[in-house]
Amino acid sequence: MKIIQSFWTGNKNSLTDSYGWLLPIFNYLSWIISCNQLRRYYDDVTLVTDSQGKP
């Protein structure tokens, strides 16, 4: 089964905008934790984002 996570930036800078988190780094850490959790159960995990989401 292919698992897809999506991230749409809304034309914000993902390196400086916190997206509701206290600091931008926490946004990235949440993605890392989420992806690692999914990888525990599925072999095929893909992140789909817009050009702003790819730092």
Image (cartoon, rainbow, N blue to C red):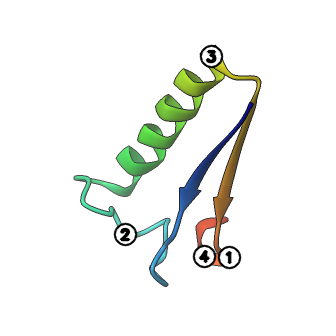
Residue 47 lies, in percent from the top left, at: 66, 50
Structural crowding at the residue carrying mark 1, measured as other residues with C-alpha within 10 Å and reported as few (<14), some (14–19) or many (≥20): few
The disc, 4 or 2, on the residue closer to the chain's N-terminal end is: 2
- Above or below 38: residue 13: below
Report the Cα–Cα distance between label 3 and label 4.
29 Å
Residue that label 1 marks? 51
Q: Is residue 22 left or right of residue 1?
A: left
Residue 3 lies, in percent from the top left, at: 66, 38
Badge 3 marks a residue whose secondary structure is: helix
Task: Tell me, yes or no, if residue 11 can be seen here.
Answer: yes
Q: Is residue 39 left or right of residue 30?
A: right
Residue that label 4 marks? 52
The disc, 3 or 4, on the residue closer to the chain's N-terminal end is: 3
Residue 26 lies, in percent from the top left, at: 36, 45
Q: Are marks 1 and 2 in contact (CB under 8 Å)?
A: no
Q: Are marks 4 and 1 in contact (CB under 8 Å)?
A: yes
Badge 2 marks a residue whose secondary structure is: loop
- Give the quarter of the image for residue 29: top left
Residue that label 2 marks? 17
Residue that label 3 marks? 41
